[in-house]
Amino acid sequence: MPEEREQKVYEALTNLGIPHIRHEHPPVFTVEQAVVHWQGIEGSHCKNLFVRNKKGNRHYLIIAEHLKKVDIQAIAKQLHSDRLSFASDERLKRFLGVSAGEVSPFGLLQDEGREVIVILDAGLQNEAFINFHPNVNTATLTISFADLLKFLGWRGNRVLVLSF
């Protein structure tokens, strides 16, 4: 199953003409665990937070530079939303098809209904290259920021760029 999820990422990137570099490493579940394996990998490394509103009828994928402090309640205010909290493992699996520690924008391949709203940290726009898991936590993929936008545009999910 993980191999299939990862393969779908490579197929999508190839079909979109998006070049990528794959970096293999042991399984990592947190940014703190991953940092030791990022030596020599060009670009910004990201943390990806999957959250939902209080009613559970809106889901957001927050993408930020890995060292950036993310205040999800401040983001909720910017969205004019009620309180945000981390989504359950069940919701993570249902909307992005991944488990905790594997979250990335590539999980949007699973979101057939385009229900997940992507929130990009505005600071990432200055990055030439950006890194994510390819729907498994045993590798990191490097793509250009422009190609991330291309991928997100192709997926068709709503994308918001916020400063936080």
Image (spheres, rainbow, N blue to C red):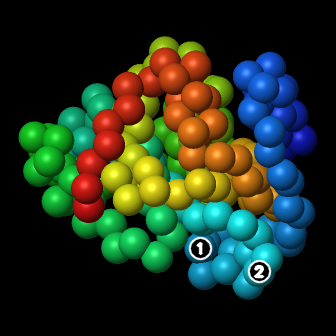
Image-based side of 121 in relation to 11, left or right: left
Residue type at mark 1?
Answer: Val
In which quadrant will I find the C terminus? bottom left
Name the spot of residue 71 as percent of width and height, x first: 26, 66
Instruction: Classify residue 66 as left or right of residue 51.
Output: right
Which comes before the other along the chain, label 2 or label 1?
Answer: 1
Q: Residue at x 70, y 47 (%)?
A: 143
Q: In this view, does 123 lie above or below 109?
A: below
Residue on which disc 2 sits: 39
Q: In this view, does 77 lie above or below 58?
A: below
**Splitting the image into 4 quarters, where does residue 109 fall?**
top right
- Percent position (x, y) of residue 42? 72, 67
Above or below 111: residue 44 = below
Residue that mark 1 sits on: 31
Q: Do the residues labelled 2 and 1 touch (CB within 8 Å)?
A: no
Residue 83's x, y, as percent?
A: 17, 51
Q: Residue at x 63, y 37 (%)?
A: 147
Q: Which amino acid does label 2 sit on?
A: Gln
Is residue 49 among the parts visible in the rendering?
no
Where the N terminus falls, by quadrant? top right
**Residue at coordinates 51% horizontally, 70% vertically from top-left?**
66
Tell me if 126 is positioned left or right of 102 in this view: left
- Residue 102 in percent (x, y) is at 66, 54
Q: Is mark 2 on a helix, strand or loop?
A: loop
The answer to whether residue 44 is seen in the rendering is yes
Camera-side mark, 2 or 1: 2
SS at badge 1:
helix
User: Which residue extends farthest top?
Assistant: 113
The local crowd at label 1, few if under 14, some if 14 to 19, many if 20 or more residues have their Cα within 10 Å, is: some
Relative depth, front residue between 154 and 82: 154
Between residue 107 and residue 14, name the one nearer to us. Answer: 14
The crowding category of the residue bearing disc 2, from other C-alpha atoms within 10 Å (few below 14, some 14 to 19, many at least 20), is few
